[in-house]
Image (cartoon, rainbow, N blue to C red):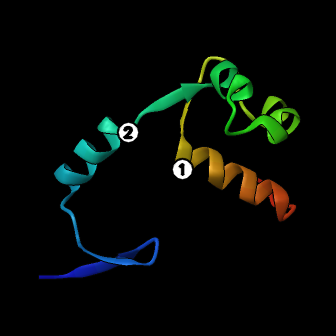
Amino acid sequence: MATTKVQGKVEPVKSEEEKEVVTDTLQTFTKDQLVKSKKYVHRRDALSALLDDGKSYSIAEIDNILNQFDKGGKQ
């Protein structure tokens, strides 16, 4: 069985169908929810500027956007 390293853990490679299921079950949040959240209380200004109104984001997407922003890179 093939494996892949995800966030420091070795996991089996998932088929495209399994990837779709995992992606579909990720909890997402709107820009407004994220800006008001306690988790990102110190990043509110950045989130307000970087996120699009009406779009939903997973926590992984937000963390990636903020990491790229911190490094000075574009999304």
Q: Quadrant of residue 55?
A: top right
Q: Is residue 19 left or right of residue 59?
A: left
Which residue occupies the foreground of this view, 39 or 1?
39
| Residue underneath mark 1 | 60
Position above or below: 75 against 73: above
Q: Quadrant of residue 49?
A: top right
Can residue 75 be spotted in the picture?
A: no
Position above or below: 5 against 71: below
Mark 1, secondary structure of its residue: helix
**Three-letter code, disc 1:** Ala
Local packing at callout 2 (Cα closer than 10 Å; few below 14, some 14-19, many 20+) is few
Marks 1 and 2: CB-CB under 8 Å? yes
Q: Is residue 73 left or right of residue 12?
A: right
Q: Position of residue 59 (x, y in %)?
A: 55, 43
Q: Position of residue 11 (x, y in %)?
A: 27, 74
Q: Position of residue 4 (x, y in %)?
A: 32, 78
**Who comes first in sequence, dot 1 or dot 2?**
2
For the point 38% across and 39% down, which residue is it?
26
**Three-letter code, disc 2:** Leu
Quadrant of image for the N terminus: bottom left
| Residue underneath mark 2 | 26
For the point 64% across and 55% down, which residue is it?
64
Q: Is residue 23 left or right of residue 71?
A: left
The single residue placed furthest to the left in the displayed view is: 1
Cα gap from disc 1 to disc 2, whole angstroms: 9 Å
